[in-house]
Amino acid sequence: MWLLVSVLLMPVVSEGIPAAGNIMDKLPGYRSELPVEGVAELHSGQDSVAELSPGLGKESFPDSLLNGKTVAVMTGSLGEMILSEEYPLVKVHCFDDIMDGFAALKAGKVHYVLTAYTTAYVVGRSDNSYIILPHNLTNEGAGIALSQDDTKGLLAQIDSVLAVFRADGTLDAIIGNWIRNDGSDYVITDFSATGAAETAVAETDVPGSAVAGSGRPPLRVGTAANREPMCFIQNNRIVGLDWELMMRIGKALGREVEFADMKYAALIAALQSGRIDAIASNMTATAERKKQVDFSSVYFVNPQVLIEWSENGDKAADGFWQQFVQALQRNVLHEKRYMLILDGLWVTFLIAVLSVIFGTFLGAGVCALRMSAGGFSRNFAKGYIALFRAIPHVVILMLMFYVVFATLRISGIVVSVITFAMIFAAYSSELFRSSLESIPTGQRHAGLALGFNKFQTFWHILLPQAVRTAFPVYKGEVISLIKMTAIVGYIAVQDLTKAGDIIRSRTFDAFFPLVMVALIYMVIIWAITRLLNLVSFKQG
């Protein structure tokens, strides 16, 4: 690597969920009856969520319950919009992942979490210290979001399919597979088999696409797969009500379905940039969203409810070791969740290594321009360095994915490598320049006086000293880049951090997956540091 750098520088020197209408008497810790008739009702051709179920839509939270309180919501959700507009005395804390909101609730950082009822029930079932309050804000009527630049008539096609599904009972069957009346396991349709619509298996691995080899372009669907039972990861695959609905729609349209799991707040940006063709993630057609995207007719209605935390003393009886073993089984071994960690670890390693290699070469080139005699080259290098050092890394990553490479079918991993290499180059180029400029100019003159040419002077005299000066700081930049890769989940890349988020969305364990991921990063950084120290020792 250093040889190539020198050449560049030389010229310058689970389980199922009961139906919403039947679960209140089964929910541990539930305090009173919540009117949720119509949670699973189907409605066609309605625009207003309140019109879908007037009894629910007109209800609201008492001011005495919320005034002065802090409420956790998911960024861009219906709950965030309504609380911000109609409850000015409420302090709204937004989280990209609602599981972060539940972690904040458990830690006492917020008073309540506001989320969809189906999510609240699954979380409450996992830990009866989470209490669903007997109030609801409004109904959340989920629709499929599509681009307003719909030149191929995809919206009309999907609405036609939904109308057929309502008429022939398919939509009822889909909801019945995931909103279970008897509390039994979810029923997952195997779309790889012949006659997939009639073939179903409970709790099994399923492929992520349908109608493979049909010759038609795939239907790219964006989702935030962290909201059981709507869309979530099970056995390392995306499943859920939204998943089955889109798989059946793809089958009806004769198109293979490809899913992209990304942050909820990034879904509309991905749709507008052309990265995906549709959004199926329990998204509500609010007035603000309708200005940006179009929506299909409503296929599922879900009330927004409040959850509070009330410590359950039963857990204190379990010893630390017993709790640790249970957490290990739940977060790592169950459903082979360790495979998520291993896959994410490989992606993190791949992005980090390639970014360091390409970023080092690019940084050497930028350094050469920065130290060149030409005014244009110097100014270009100065502008490049200033640009990539001034903008937050996550913003650069999202701009590269959703704007610069929006029209190209480039994977998120490739975009991540390109982005981090360019960022790394901005920092490493200044490191190379400062290390070279720290060498007295008399040494270059002495080399030339001894009969060395420019390359020999650079290789034998200047480069060894520059490497010794730059390498300690270079190690720190490498370590920083490894940690920087944790943001790639924003562009639908499943790295180590994203794997931890997926596990939390399934186990609702606020801390164990975070601690596990943190320890893995510590081991990675320790190993890389030791390796670089060996290189430094041999160099010395």
Image (tube, helix red, strand yellow):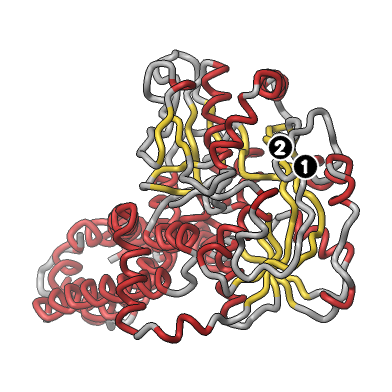
* Mark 1 vs mark 2, CA separation in Å: 7 Å
10 Å neighbourhood of mark 2: few (<14), some, or many (≥20)?
many
Give the residue type at disc 2.
Gly
In which quadrant is the N terminus drawn? bottom left
Q: Which type of secondary structure does the marked residue at label 2 adopt? A: strand
Which residue is depicted at the point 48% across and 42% down? 186
**Residue position for label 2:** 143
Residue 461 visible within the image? yes
Q: Is residue 347 visible?
A: no
Residue 477 position in % (x across, y down): 35, 72
Decide if residue 59 is on the left or right side of residue 372: right
Secondary structure of the residue carrying numbered label 1: loop
| Looking at the image, residue 532 lies above or below residue 258 | below
298 to the left or right of 511: right
Question: Horizontal and vertical percent for residue 103?
Answer: 55, 73
Q: Nearer the viewer, residue 406 or 76?
A: 76
Give coordinates of residue 168: x percent, y percent.
66, 18
- What label does residue 316 carry, if any? none
Disc 1: which residue: 285
Q: Position of residue 537 (x, y in %)?
A: 12, 81
Contact? badges 1 and 2 (CB < 8 Å): yes
Q: Compared with residue 254, is residue 118 higher up or lower down, i.e. above or below? A: below
Q: Residue at x 42, y 86 (%)?
A: 317
Identified at 27% across, 70% down, the residue is 524
